Structures are given as C-alpha cells and as structure tokens.
Image: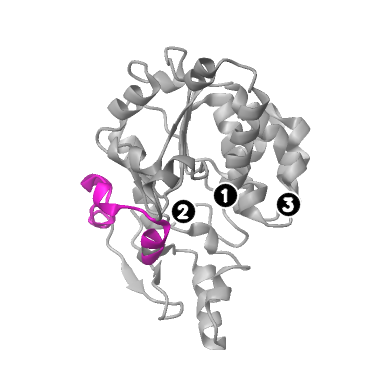
Amino acid sequence: AWLAPTGVPRQPAGVLRVQAHRWPHSLRHWQWALWTSEASRELWSTHAPELLDVYLSYNKSVERADATRLLIMSVYGGVYADLDVVPCDDFERSLSDAMGGAGRCSTNEQCSVPLLLVRDPWRGKPARQAVQHVSNFFFASVPDHPFWGFALRLLAERRSHPWGTMYKTGPYFVDHAWKSFRRLNGGCPAQLLEKSAAVLTHNDWQEQRFGVHHWTSTWHLSAEILPAFSQTPRARSRAQEALAQARGVVVDEGLLDWLGVDRAKDCAEGSLQAVFADLPLQKRLLTRRSKKWALYVNESLV
C-alpha cells in the first residue's frame, strides 16, 4: 500500500518504484496492485464499514497503511510486500514450497498451508530468531483466513495504545494479534494449528529465496519525524525542503547491521546494487553525519 503523507505526491519515490515494479516484472502472470489512499478508503467502506471510523482515526499514513494491508489480505489474499521488498528470481517456487501447493497456491484453496508469516531478524543468539516477533513487511495467504478477521477486530482496542505506531498497527501489533489468535485456538490439536500457518524466521525467508527487505524507511519522511533527525536550524530547513520535494527515501545500511540482517543471505538480484543499476539518481546527505542516514532526492523518474 502507498498512502502518501500530507503534502507528498501520490507516487512513491523513484527508487521505491523501481523496487516495487520488480514484482510485476518478475511475476508477469500475476495481478499486481499498488494501493493508493483513495483505493484503500474505498476498500474499508466496501468490505469493513464497521471499522471505517478506526481507519479514519489514524493520524499517520503509516498506521493507515499498516491496517489496510490486513484488510487486503482478508479480502483478496495473495501476497503482500512492502514497497522496499524486492523478489528473488525463485520467488514462485519458494512460495509454493513453503505453502505446500502448486503454482499460485497463495490465491486459491490448493494450499495445504494457507497462511505464511515472517519474523523480523534478530542480531543476538540464533535461538532467539525462532521466537522473534512476527513482522508485517510480507504476508502470503488465502482469502478469508480467520487470522485476518481476528486481527482486524483487534485494531479498535489498540488504536490508542500509548506506545505508538509499532504497537497500534505495526509489527508489534501483528505479533500480539498472532499470539492472541493462537491462544484463542489453543483448544485445537497442535497438528491443525501447525497446518493453518507457517511462520518463517527472517533467515529462513532469505535462505529460501523469497526476497530482500531493504528497510527503506519511507515513513520517516513525515513532518513529525524527519526534522527530528536534524539538530540545527539549517538541517531542519533542509529536511523540510526535502519533505516538500517528496522525492526521497531514507536508507540506513547501519540499521541492517543493528537489526541483525545477514546480507550475505540476500539473493543478488534483489540487492540495492541491482536496483540502483536501473535507477540513475543523485545522492546527498541531509541528516546528521554521525548517522548513516542517506536521503535520495531529485531522482530521475522511471
């Protein structure tokens, strides 16, 4: 979903468009959609009118995007991926192997495993990866899987969570919803629960060659967040200028190391080098030099 913040054009920045368009380029027989604010609101109005007030209550675009991806999966199923996720060439085979079906099993009832979730990476002990929180950058599912309806109903009670976006709608919310869903279905045989979903560690997701997640932090490009990285009046002014131009994304290679992403496991065709090879751009650093945030602006549109 691409839900543009106030004052930002309704098309994602050039590098993100290149990343996102790798999907229809690589999976030509799939139907691909980039969800806009207008389409998302229509989706809520049509398929979950009882939750429209919850959706409209979110002040941040990222929260509306977080919530909308849950409804998209409930209504349509298929595959959801953030704009900064680039598929590997083996994506279809990996999806079929993980979900136990043939071909595009994520969109029909041929899947023996009808729901696929992925955990975030972990930089500590390997054993922790298996219990790291479930994330929301990638989903695969048949339509109407009961987990999505359960998660959607939780949005109302979490919309005022005091700890912010991550807990209201983001990865920590999805992890909470998944754990609550499993507890609610605790009376089911273990074999049935295991067959209802597969939850991969981030390392597994990489090694099975699904894709590469670049953590290109577009939601930091907001009036509330981007200037916070800029500690001087001049830097804040330049940050606001970049926000107004709205042709940037924030990339922090140091963040990947901090998160514990093993970049050696990434498929080559999903690397930033491969993406940038398709996108001539100019780079300039707009935020504190002590950080590795790089803001890409004035990009050539492709």
Residue 212 position (above or below residue 223) = above
Q: Is residue 99 visible?
A: yes
Q: Secondary structure at mark 3?
A: loop
Q: Whole-percent x and y of residue 118?
A: 45, 38
Q: Find disc 2 in the rendering and name its residue.
A: 12
Nearest the viewer among 124 and 36 is: 124
Res. 189 image quadrant: top right
Say the numbered circle drawn on residue 161: 3
Q: Secondary structure at mark 1?
A: loop
Dominant secondary structure of the magenta stretch? Answer: helix
Q: Earlier in the sequence, mark 3 or mark 2?
A: 2
Residue 78 position (above or below residue 188) = below
Looking at numbered disc 1 in the image, what kind of residue is underneath it? Leu
Res. 20 image quadrant: top left
Q: CA distance from mark 1 to mark 3?
A: 21 Å
Q: Whole-percent x and y of residue 199?
A: 46, 32
Q: Find disc 1 in the rendering and name its residue.
A: 3
Which residue is farthest bottom? 233
Residues rendered magenta in the picture: 254-278
Q: Earlier in the sequence, mark 1 or mark 2?
A: 1
Q: Earlier in the sequence, mark 1 or mark 3?
A: 1
